[in-house]
Image (cartoon, rainbow, N blue to C red):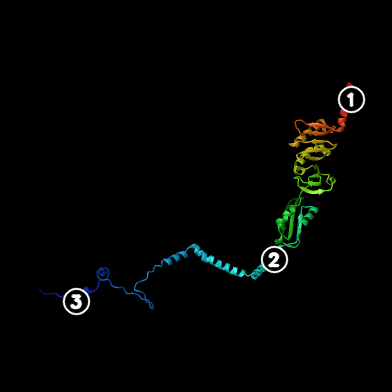
Amino acid sequence: MRQVKPRRDLVAYRDKPPSGPDAEFASADAAPTARPKLRLKGRKRAGRKADPAPSRLSYRYQRWMLTPGIRLGLRIGVPVSLVLLAAGVFFADETRRDMVRGHVNDVITSIQERPEFMVNLMAIDGAGSGLSEDIREVVPLDFPISSWDLDVEQIRDVIAGLDPVKSVSVRIRPGGILQVDVVERQPAVVWRTRDGIELLDETGAHVDEIASRADRPDLPLIAGEGADAHVAEALALLRAARGLGDRVRGLVRVGERRWDLVLDRDQRIMLPTERPVQALERVLAVSEVQDLLERDVAVVDMRIGSRPTIRMNETASEQWRNAKITKTGNGQ
């Protein structure tokens, strides 16, 4: 039998290493071969390749640097701290502090003393001549003065503390004018005390002092301790007694608890503590019907509403006694 020799090209093909998918199977059977190592020029590396992952310390440091608070501190806190440190070092010297303080004061003064900020005069409206003089006396201002140096609230409080002032407003008008608008108290009654004669408004507030009652004959008169605290009630009684006209002389506060209405001819109406206006109206109604106050009556006592009492004057009492004696003598 003829022996067939293998062809050379087939032998060469068989000896050629497989490529493609078959190469993987072939590599599994073959012994592992070392891969070529890449070397950097000028640097020798170890035989084992370094791990590209960061170390634990490096990882924690990177995470810490990504914290919002740390980033904010580095971006803002550190520059501010450096600025404060530099400022502290600079102002540690007293000479530097005085220099900076003087420069700042000069700048502030130059701004405050500009013409548009200067106040040249004070205008007072709503007050009489006497009150205007008192206001200028209690508010001594040396004009011109900067508006930055004026305490408007303090000026208003000082003026409001004056007795004749009911209310006041203070403001700085354009043109450098300190405007003071005053509402003056109007006296409503004359109050006679042991210390003198005063004028009170409808609330009982002190307005002024006068030398004698003749200085204000147009105002009603009240007297007695504590009368200033009940001016409103006194005015209500005086309004109720308007029908008596000029016969009313005034009101007297008795025991700091009630009123006596004093009339001419030494007549007196003693009013109760409670509801004095109604008691006075009852007396006036009886007087209109029976001419009670036109008779020789000295006192009409209304302190006990259920039992009014009338006291005759001295002349009427003497005549009544004489008539009674005469009548008794004729009977005997």
Label 3, on which residue? 8
Q: Secondary structure at mark 2?
A: helix
Q: Residues within 10 Å of mark 2 (few under 14, many from 20)?
A: few
Residue 140 horizontal/vertical position (percent): 76, 59
Q: Relative to residue 277, is residue 75 depicted above or below? A: below
Q: Residues within 10 Å of mark 1 (few under 14, many from 20)?
A: few
Q: Callout 1, which amino acid?
A: Thr
Q: Earlier in the sequence, mark 3 or mark 1?
A: 3
- Is 16 on the left or on the right of 290, as rendered? left
Q: Callout 2, which amino acid?
A: Thr
Quarter of the N terminus within the rendering: bottom left
Label 2 to label 3: alpha-carbon separation: 114 Å
Residue 192 horizontal/vertical position (percent): 81, 44
Residue 236, by quadrant, is: top right
Label 1, on which residue? 326
The reply to whether dot 3 and dot 1 touch (C-beta < 8 Å) is no
Residue drawn at (81%, 48%) of the image:
209
Q: Residues within 10 Å of mark 3 (few under 14, many from 20)?
A: few
Residue 274 horizontal/vertical position (percent): 73, 36
Q: Callout 3, which amino acid?
A: Arg
Label 2, on which residue? 109
- Is 215 on the left or on the right of 181, as rendered? right
Q: Secondary structure at mark 3?
A: helix
Mark 2, mark 1: which one is toward the viewer? 1
Residue 235, by quadrant, is: top right
The reply to whether dot 2 and dot 1 touch (C-beta < 8 Å) is no
Q: Relative to residue 289, is residue 178 depicted above or below? A: below
Mark 2, mark 3: which one is toward the viewer? 2
Between 136 and 81, the one nearer to me in the picture = 81
